[in-house]
Image: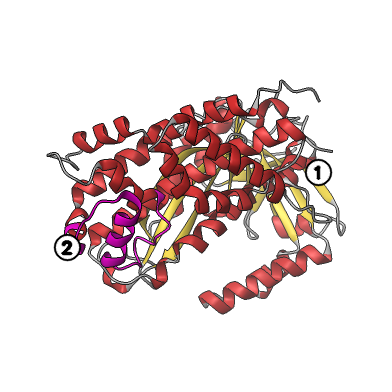
Amino acid sequence: MAFFMMPLHQEMKLLHQQLLTQFSAETITQLAIDTKFIQRTRKLTAMDSLLLFVFSSKHLSKSSLEKLSTHLEKVTGKEISAEGLNQRFNWRTVVFLQAIFERLLQTKCLHSFQKLMKYSTIFEKIRVLDSTAFQIPDAYADWFPGTGCTSVKFQIEFELLSGQFTHAHFEPGRVHDAKTGNQLSQTIQPKELILRDLGYFNLEELDKLNTKGQRYFISRLRNNAIVYTKNATPSYYPNGKIVKNTEFHRQTIQALAETVPLNETKEFEGFYVGKANVKMPVRLVICHFTPAQQEKRLARMNEIERVKGRHYKEKTKEMSAYGMYITNLPIEIEKDEIYQIYSLRWQIELFFKVWKSTMNLVSCKPMKIERFICYFYSQLIRVILCTMITYQMRYILWEKSQKELSEMKGIELFFDNLVDIYLAMKESTESVVQALIRIFHQLERNGIKSRKKGKPTFQQLIGTLQ
């Protein structure tokens, strides 16, 4: 496959202009004034504060105020007392960080794998919505009530081909995922594919997407789902109107799954899913996993039982041998590809794994709520910035040398280098470009994705690699 090879220096300059100019001194200072974070001239500027909130390696929710102020002085050369820093954690600071976060969320990425993807004539974007929850100290129970414990939940929607975040927010742990899913379903555009887990399943919303055309989905089905086929000989009233309860035949998903041979995928044609008033025609695909896959899924269920105290029925464990999916993708995408495409949803799980290793909220000490929420926004900004740059680097690396970058290694490396990028930003654009080039070469040497037998990589799944 031929590529247009832009010089690396030019690529990094464009990347700086596209993303990091959101953090220019002029932009940050104006946001600080607009949000009243800064109301008069101070020795500690908005950019100095940004170091602490976003670019510092210090843990904002676990480090003491004394350690934070010492670190700030070491990097910026400016002194601030622990109490002075404590006063900086207020609601104006929350609004300031929220403004930075919202600007970053609206940043458009330069590169996307869309044109290289084998399915590009059918869909152009892959939007993955998922959530991750963190247990937090009970001191915040009034702000973040959870289910069984005090917890905060982060809702993230991510476009896989470009690294663009289309939605991100945090909320109390007990809020149901479906609320966010229903809201975001209204924003799906033509030639977009959504991948979601069962927590977001809403038949009415999927039916709306189906009727609008060129808005695609792949969704799992529950083990106890009822599916339907059309009755060839329904009953009719004397006036010619069909008797509703004779229009469809009901079938259980378990009965269909048991007809699929081991390690095979089968598509069932002419099926509908729905309830009394909504029955939607779908492509129904069932995979009978290999023994190794079944063992892995059972191990995960056993771990959930052990850690969360949840109990799975034996029938549920038996059905873990199958993957049941519905989709409205056109028949050009074959049944064997449906599960492969849906498995792309795990890309966001990898990114959550990195995030959880850096946040570790359960071990943070109690502090005033303003500081705690500042920490949430600072982490959202950090993770979105690092992920977006990593995904753009991934495209550039593939274009330059046909090598596939590990998302996890890339995001972790950027977390480690944020303070260096901050210091470069205080010097010049060229300093930032050189810092990005240095990081790129580190990724090229040490960030290549490992190939595991039987586990296709992201680029294999979307068809850019064989």
Q: Is residue 52 above or below residue 336?
A: below
Left or right: residue 300 versus residue 198 is right
Q: Nearer the viewer, residue 376 or 290?
A: 376
Q: Which residues are magenta?
A: 55-84
Residue 236 location (% of width, % of height): 63, 36
Q: Is residue 71 above or below residue 200?
A: below
Query: Which callout, 1 or 2, points at the residue further toward the start of the chain?
Result: 2
Left or right: residue 68 versus residue 252 is left
Q: Quadrant of residue 366?
A: bottom left
Outermost residue to the left: 40
Residue under circle 2? 83
Residue 83: in magenta span: yes
Residue 427 location (% of width, % of height): 40, 36
> Which numbered circle lies on residue 200?
none
Say which element carries label 2: helix
Residue at 86%, 59% in the rendered image: 262
Q: Identify residue type, mark 1.
A: Asp
Q: Is residue 4 above or below residue 56?
A: above
In the rendered image, the quadrant that contains the N terminus is top right
Residue under circle 1? 336
Residue 365 location (% of width, % of height): 32, 72
Q: Quadrant of residue 330?
A: top right
Task: Please rate how many residues cluster around mark 2, counting C-alpha atoms within 10 Å: few if below 14, some from 14 to 19, many from 20.
Answer: few
Q: Nearer the viewer, residue 135 or 176?
A: 135
Residue 14 location (% of width, % of height): 53, 26
Left or right: residue 22 versus residue 431 is left
Separation of marks 1 and 2 at Cα, in angstroms: 61 Å
Q: Are marks 1 and 2 in contact (CB under 8 Å)?
A: no
Say which element carries label 1: helix
